[in-house]
Image: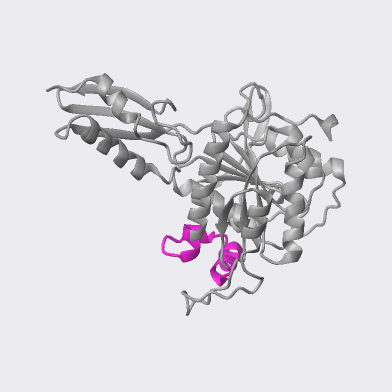
Amino acid sequence: MNITKEQVIEALKNVIDPDLKKDLITLGMVEDIKVEGLNVSFTVVLTTPACPMKAMIQSACENAIIHFVNEKANVSVNMTARTSSGRAESEQLLPEVKNIIAIASGKGGVGKSTVAANLAVALAKCGAKVGLIDADIYGPSQHIMFGVENERLFVNEKDGKTYMLPVEKYGVKVLSIGMLVDPDRAIPWRGPMASKALKQLFSDAEWGELDYMLIDLPPGTGDIHLTLVSAVPVTGAVVVSTPQHVALADAKKGINMFQLETINVPVLGLVENMSYFTPAELPQNKYYIFGKEGCKQLAEKMNVPLIGEIPLVQSIREGGDTGIPVALDEDSLVSKAFEEAADHLVRQVAIRNANIEPSKRVAAAAY
């Protein structure tokens, strides 16, 4: 007995997206259904090319046809992706960037820039188009972490205007204020100067199409943060902290800032950096130097996801110093920790985009 298209649709209504909690048909994720006798083919459009559930969803689709339609069916599932966007389509600045994600910390020294760099690399490894802006105007470091301190910035003429071309390395487009200033000269940035410099990293650069643009913010809650939310629609924020009480107190302030009614940027999650110390010669041992599960407790208290726990190991520091992020090491336990954090991040972005109105720029008068 031949299979019908209607039978395929009914069967796929039994496949539930594990994050969005709805079936693939309702979510509009199934396209191009073709049926010829017992041969069935269709395309499943995921919400991100970095989807960690890709293999599981594909297997569930194949099993649904065999179980609910015909056990002799020959099923071919084409898995592709169309990254969901967390911004209003009417926005003119960075129109091809689908999601803008702020990487923030309440205080300095917690490894925010290291986390931002390795998250960007981990996302790129999964096939996503990724950009990284070093908005830490007062202490830029991404040009060092990506080993592009001496890279020359090229420009492109477009519509009578000159645009900087971000440097691309490890699959990530990177632009840092550190590429534009003398590394041996201190620049005393006033608030308006710093804000103007940040806006130029958006408006005067040719970013092209990106699934995720990560913004490495300065520590604290200041001018640059307010400039960011007023300049571009921010999809969500990730807050980085270490487990000890003094860092968590400031991380809580960072979360509260994004959750202010006048700013209202969804907090996608909390990353605990330096979660525990693991010696290279004893990789199974964990020593909780800065305390245990501090970010887990804060995440539960603030009702935000804990999306990553990154250990304190020497290879992370070495990767930052040499310009080769540790997330590039396929065999490293630390790399796997960043991959897991990136997986959780893209899932939170997809959930946010499915359930919350698109982000808009915050009017300067609102804060």
Q: Position of 218 compared to 308: left or right?
A: right
Which residue lies at the image location 65% right of the left edge and 35% below the top edge? 205
Number of marks in picture? 0
Displayed quadrant of residue 79 = top left
Residue 178 horizontal/vertical position (percent) = 71, 51
Residue 227 horizontal/vertical position (percent) = 78, 38
Q: Which residues are magenta?
A: 312-336
Residue 2 horizontal/vertical position (percent) = 14, 22
Displayed quadrant of residue 276 = bottom right
As drawn, which residue projects farthest toward the left? 1
Quadrant of the drawing holding the N terminus: top left
* Foreground of the two, 163 or 235: 235
Residue 82 horizontal/vertical position (percent) = 45, 31
Quadrant of the drawing holding the C terminus: top right
* Foreground of the two, 142 or 36: 36
Q: Is residue 325 above or below residue 27?
A: below
Q: Is residue 148 visible?
A: no
Dominant secondary structure (helix, strand or loop) of the stretch shown in magenta: helix
Colour mapping: one colour
Residue 329 magenta-drawn? yes
Residue 295 magenta-drawn? no
Q: Is residue 66 visible?
A: yes
Which residue lies at the image location 40% right of the left edge and 28% below the top edge? 29
Which residue lies at the image location 66% right of the left edge and 40% below the top edge? 266
Which residue lies at the image location 55% right of the left edge and 55% below the top edge? 118
